[in-house]
Image (spheres, grey):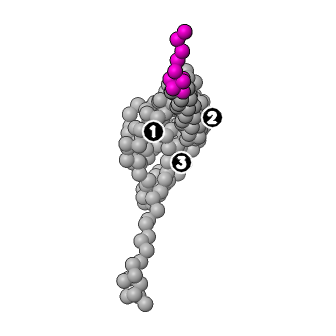
Amino acid sequence: MNTIPLQWMIVAGVAVVALLAVAVWLLSQKRKQSARLQQRFGPEYSRTVGELGGRTKAESELKAREKRVEDLSITPLSPAEATRFSQAWSALQGRFVDNPKGVVIQADQLVRELMAKRGYPMGDFERRAADISVDHPTVVENYRAAQTIAARDQRGEADTEELRKAVVHYRVLFDEMLDVREARQEAPSAQQMAVHS
């Protein structure tokens, strides 16, 4: 009768327990990653899962977006730049009644200019939307909706109310992206304080 020595049984038991512990840890890490991505991307997470047909592919895509945007130099606007963009938007809105089709095109151009000024690359629409979704996941759907209406307008299928909605969608993204850099006020040094005392 062949018997397995007790030592080998103990080693095998420890190995099985270790493998189970590693599997549980890996599963826990995967769940944490999924929760982090869901938290960060919000509705964009669900949209990407639906579009790509599964969590694994969607999470790989979302992590690739994060990495890509991490390598960009996204900067806030100076107060003067923000004022210029805000004034341009106000002027654009004032022209809507007289030229709704032209204003939708101008709104798209102004949003693109703002994105470029902030440091986002100006590739195709889907790439821009994907890049925006990393830092602005709650408003990227507005960008998609505005683009859909603009495309319908190019085919002559959008009415004035839809054009108004497109401008509203662009405005939501515009407001979100209008991040202003506050002027840094340095604390006076001890020497400067002594001079003024």
Instruction: Kindly identify which residue carries mark 3.
Output: 176
Q: Is mark 3 on a helix, strand or loop?
A: helix
Q: Which of marks 2 and 3 is in front?
A: 3
Q: What element carries label 1?
A: helix
153 relative to 74, above or below: above
Q: Earlier in the sequence, mark 1 or mark 2?
A: 1
Instruction: Kindly identify which residue carries mark 2.
Output: 161
**Residue drawn where x is 43% and y is 90% of the image:** 197
Q: Which of marks 2 and 3 is nearer the N terminus?
A: 2
97 vs 30, nearest the viewer: 30
Question: Would residue 159 be found to the left or right of residue 132 on screen?
Answer: right
Spatial separation of the CA atoms under disc 2 and disc 3: 23 Å
Q: In which quarter of the image is residue 122?
A: top left
Magenta stretch bounds: 1-10
**Residue drawn where x is 47% and y is 56% of the image:** 180
**Residue drawn where x is 57% and y is 37% of the image:** 32
Question: Whole-percent x and y of residue 135?
Answer: 50, 44
Spatial separation of the CA atoms under disc 1 and disc 3: 18 Å
User: Which quadrant of the figure contains the N terminus?
Assistant: top right
Q: Which of marks 1 and 3 is in front?
A: 1
Identified by mark 1, the residue type is Glu
Identified by mark 3, the residue type is Glu
Q: Is mark 2 on a helix, strand or loop?
A: helix
Q: How many marks?
A: 3
Res 57 visible: yes
Instruction: Kindly identify which residue carries mark 1.
Output: 66
Question: Whole-percent x and y of residue 121?
Answer: 38, 39
89 vs 133, nearest the viewer: 133
Identified by mark 2, the residue type is Glu
Question: Whole-percent x and y of residue 40?
Answer: 55, 41
